[in-house]
Image (cartoon, grey):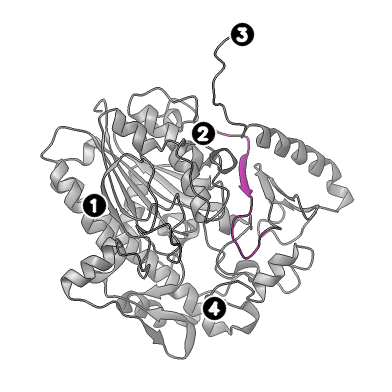
Amino acid sequence: MPDQPNVLWICTDQQRADTLGCYGNDFVETPNIDELASSGVRFDRAYAQSPVCTPSRASFLTGRYPRTTGVRGNGYPIPESETLVTRRLADEGYVCGLSGKLHVNPAHPDSDDLPMGERRIDDGYADFQWSHGTTHPSPVNEYQRWLLEEGVEYEERPVGDCEHVTVGMPPEHHQTTWCARKAESFIERAAEDDEPWLYSVNPFDPHHAFVAPDGYLQRYLDRLDEIPLPDYEPGELDDKPPWYRECHEGAYANENLFPFEEMDERDHRLVIAAYWAMCDLIDDAVGRLLDALERTGQREDTLVIFTSDHGELLGEHGIYLKGAFFYEESLRVPLIVSGPEIESGVETDALVELVDLAPTLMEAAGQEVPRAMQGESLWPLLTGETDADTHRESVYAEAYDTVHWQAPTDYSTMVRTNDHKLVRHHRAETGELYDLAADPAERENRWDDPDYADVRSDLLARLADRMAETADPLPERRTPW
């Protein structure tokens, strides 16, 4: 293995784990990602530290928890004092590049003080091809600028009378493909240089709105009646916080309502079809990138990571999209790592967190893990030095004012062990407790069940310990007193 392996870091947006063939989905067509999993380590229980974009991305890029970074929700700016792992690797000789989203800062198009679309800190990216999304109106949305150069106008058209799904750009002009093309060009240029590199490929898909290329969507339309409906039982939200029920009814404060109760079975299946179709397109992009590595002779020297920033409810529990929800569909994401010295064909159910990725990259590059990082490096597990099925005793996530339509009620934290999950809604003074062994669908809230009083007490203590561990390790002690 080279002293400093290259890193191809593919991070999709809002992609839950069960959208890939290697995670058990028999509908999707994801042969490239499946092959990547067979050549490396596939984590079956990898969890984001926030169920929404900005706090999750700031967390795994710094190796620090959302509360520590100060990026508690979407719309919060990352402080200049925070250091991304890309900056740390650039300081060690890496050439870093990005195509697609970064989103560790506000990227709202109506903000007068954000003329570039997203303020940048010293993030270490020397090649910065920024595109927050397909329709984001920033003048520096490189994808839209590329469409103009190609003489192509961005278009969407409805799918019949369904108002929740549209047909979008063809693959050759899709933002996911554009992200891959930019990365491919970088990989080809890097083959001519001696410096190690890291490239972040961050497509907007399969984030809502549910917009899929025609050919990819058509494959699902041909078997629409076979697509399973969202997993929901009427009444299961009765003992959940009020914003769960509000989102079930479509009370999102944006244009993408997705009101579960007003959608019929065809609507639900069309949304799922479009979501899966976007995942299939992502797989084609991954195949393109892996081919570029092989073609340029860099595959054996490159660490490839495939993951996502958080999940998507997709109608499960009667809710679409995201928010301060800690269901498995919201937090559990795909995580696949392949490359030099990585064990091959390993499937692990170790509990891991995305915050573990930054220290993993530091160790893979032969660098000391900075004291500022709070994650636990996966490198010993990946290389077979430690038991593949053991990493953490629990995973932790938090939602502090994550999205504006639920503020200020959603001060919530979660701890999940092998068999149980506890969520504390601090301002609502209530919570959720699930026996995952008996109730993997998380339907029965055992918070007030006297039979689970001891379990709740134990998990509340664990949660307090995990929250204490988010205390910033900086600044370091300098003298005894």
Main SS, magenta residues: loop
In the displayed structure, 337 sits above or below 11; it is: above
Q: Please give the residue where the numbered disc 4 appears in the rendered image.
A: 268
The quadrant in which residue 324 appears is bottom right
Separation of residues labelled 1 and 2 (CA atoms)? 27 Å
Q: How far apart are the alpha carbons under marks 4 and 1?
A: 34 Å
| x and y percentages locating residue 321 in the rendered image | 55, 66
Report if the CB atoms under discs 2 and 4 are less than 8 Å apart: no
Rounded to the nearest angstrom, the CA distance separating label 3 from label 2 is: 26 Å
Q: Earlier in the sequence, mark 4 or mark 1?
A: 1
Q: Quadrant of residue 5?
A: top left
Say which amino acid is labelled 1. Answer: Ala
On the image, numbered disc 2 is attached to which residue? 375
Residue holding disc 1: 183
Q: Position of residue 394 (x, y in %)?
A: 63, 38
Residue 350 shows in this picture:
no
Would you say the residues marked 1 and 2 are in contact, meaning their CB atoms lie under 8 Å apart? no
Using the image, determine if residue 239 lies above or below residue 391.
below
Residue toward you, 471 or 49? 471
Comes first in the chain, label 3 or label 1:
1
Q: Of the residues under marks 4 and 3, which one precedes in the sequence?
A: 4
* Residue located beneath label 3 in the image: 480
User: The residue tagged with tag 2: helix, strand or loop?
Assistant: loop
Residue 326 falls left or right of residue 449: left
The kind of residue on which mark 4 rests is: His
Three-letter amino acid code at disc 3? Answer: Pro
Q: Are marks 4 and 3 in contact (CB under 8 Å)?
A: no
Answer whether labels 3 and 1 touch (C-beta < 8 Å). no
The nearer-to-camera label among 3 and 2 is: 3
Identity of the residue furthest to the bottom in this view: 161
Q: Earlier in the sequence, mark 3 or mark 2?
A: 2
Q: Which contiguous range is marked in magenta?
A: 390-407
